[in-house]
Image (tube, rainbow, N blue to C red):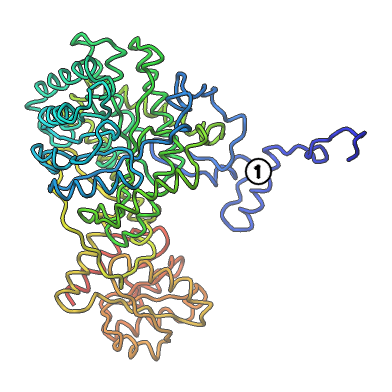
Amino acid sequence: MTAESPELPLAAAFPDADRAQWQRLVEGVLRKSGVTDAAGAAAEDALATDLQDGIRIRPLYTAEDAPAAPGHPGFPPFVRAGRPEGTAVAGWDVRQRHADTDPRRTNEAVLADLENGVTSLWLTVGDGGVPVAGLAEALQGVYLDLATVALDPGAGFTAAAEELLRLYASSGVPLSEASGNLGADPLGLLARTGDDGVLGDQLAAAVRLARRCTADAPGLRALAVDALPYHEAGGSSAEELGASLATGVAYLRELTGSGLGVDDACRQLEFRYAASADQFLTIAKLRAARRLWARVAEVCGASPEASAQRQHAVTSTVMMTRRDPWVNMLRTTVAGMSAGVGGADAVTVLPFDAALGLPDAFARRIARNTQSVLLEESHLSRVIDPAGGSWYVEQLTDELARAAWAFFQEIEGAGGQAAALRSGMLGERLAATWARRSQDLAHRREPITGVSEFPHLAEPPVHREPAPAPSGGGLPRVRRDDAYEALRARSDARLEATGARPKIFLAALGPVAAHTARLTFAANLFQAGGIETVPETVDAESVGEAFARSGAHIACLCASDAVYGEQAAAVAAALKSAGALRVHLAGKPGERREEFVGAGVDAFVFAGCDAVEVLSSALDVTEVA
């Protein structure tokens, strides 16, 4: 390129690619891999992924898929950020949770957090946390004019709020300089406990706090719109958003009905959402939440300045596992990153051992350092809405917002959030969603690393001091690992009672190349249920002796389809003769099902089978052996 020659675009020498051309390439790959002979749009559709809420993720997005422009940061509909500067100036608020009932230990943990990167505190107070009378000791040495304090006070929010306000006064901090959230959430309590006998009184008390904050402490918000109960009951992202909107609208009605202006009422709410390891869904959820609330505020007559949703994102407890908890560090890192990229104002990364009880000092350090790395080393907060402009993210945000709005309208049609909770309508919808997701978990279509995939049976268990029991009686609290945890608990009980775990003999047939893939699959599957695997290469003549030597009572054949045709029937019969109570075969039986079953094969295990049912049945057999 010379100074005299015109500058040419890099792509000028190449013809424009179109979607049809890309689809033809997809057709060839799918045909060669044996997946499908579909052509055109059908071939593209074969690569799509279905999510909850009727959302379908396509393999390719173009400019044609982009929805309407999402606006600018800090301006309605606030999709891109709640403030013009986003979190680029000071980063998001690093908010760590504390739920120890001992004020002295809480104070030690609080000071360690604040001295090492945490910028605000989220304190469980009263039932399940530090006593209200111990709040002063828990916050001893904390500069309340610098550290934001958010309370999680449960039903005792009035007493907790009064004590915190007293501490501001006694420490000489003017209420005008206080910042945080008093945590009043009567509808969240109804969801958690199912007790609506005092809902009216609680709403009135929350309104009084909000009016006081508006008059004297503009930096304090009185109410939390906590969507975690709906996420933790198994709800989808759209259901979590829809329930939060209905709760927020209910609070706006109460606040404005008491004479508070709509702008002041909006400023009294902070919304809390779960952040999961599904990074794009989390990013889209937080962006969609701001868009939806901006629409609610607009309809209610709020000014643009008061319509931006204040968001607190918390890493999901549903995704946290009790087995191999170290993997939770990876999950919370992705979730924390997604929350920051999605524009959350405050982010809480739960310690990796939170599912086991009270986190230890190491786990808390890792949790806060996770955010420090994201902020200080990865510089995630320095770009406003870094996912913005992605055709995929913009389309996902739009689809999620529409699904959430539809669910919000359903709740309003049922009489509002309180009525939907009382009638069971909301609980039934969440339960149905969780039942569908449980099927995906049971069939391992949604894998759980370290639990349903790649379990480590020999790892010593991680023990923590028990955490206070959460409030019950309302919506359930679920975890992705629930079904597998129940299976592993049965294995642990067998180990404690007998000194050995249940075992399964893996009969590897033929050469290594023929059995390795299915041997690995079977080992991974059965270990997910706490069943120890004993593999050995055998044939019909040697399998009986090897099986007896293994100490197992059940077995699984592992080989290629070709080797099965030659050896499976004979080996299965030999295993039954040797005393095997159940014989599995790794792989789909195809046309030879009757032959294999007739030879002694009791069950077939394969990718997509109901792993929980297979493992439960296998444990049933071993427990009566």
- Horizontal side, residue 341 vs residue 36: left or right: left
Q: Residues within 10 Å of mark 1 (few under 14, many from 20)?
A: some
Image vertical order of residue 43 relative to residue 442, above or below: above
* Quarter assignment of residue 281: top left
Q: Quadrant of the N terminus?
A: top right
Q: Residue at x 51, y 35 (%)?
A: 393
Image vertical order of residue 402 relative to residue 462, above or below: above
Q: Residue at x 22, y 19 (%)?
A: 213
Mark 1: which secondary structure? helix
Image vertical order of residue 327 relative to residue 207, above or below: below
Q: Nearer the viewer, residue 232 or 375?
A: 375
Question: Residue 301: x, y in percent?
Answer: 35, 9
* Residue linked to disc 1: 23
Image vertical order of residue 548 relative to residue 26, above or below: below
- Horizontal side, residue 453 vs residue 151: left or right: right
* Quarter assignment of residue 131: top left
* Quarter assignment of residue 10: top right
Q: Residue at x 55, y 23 (%)?
A: 69
Q: Which amino acid type corresponds to the residue marked 1 in the rendered image?
A: Gln
Q: Nearer the viewer, residue 464 or 501?
A: 464
Question: Residue 170: x, y in percent?
Answer: 14, 29
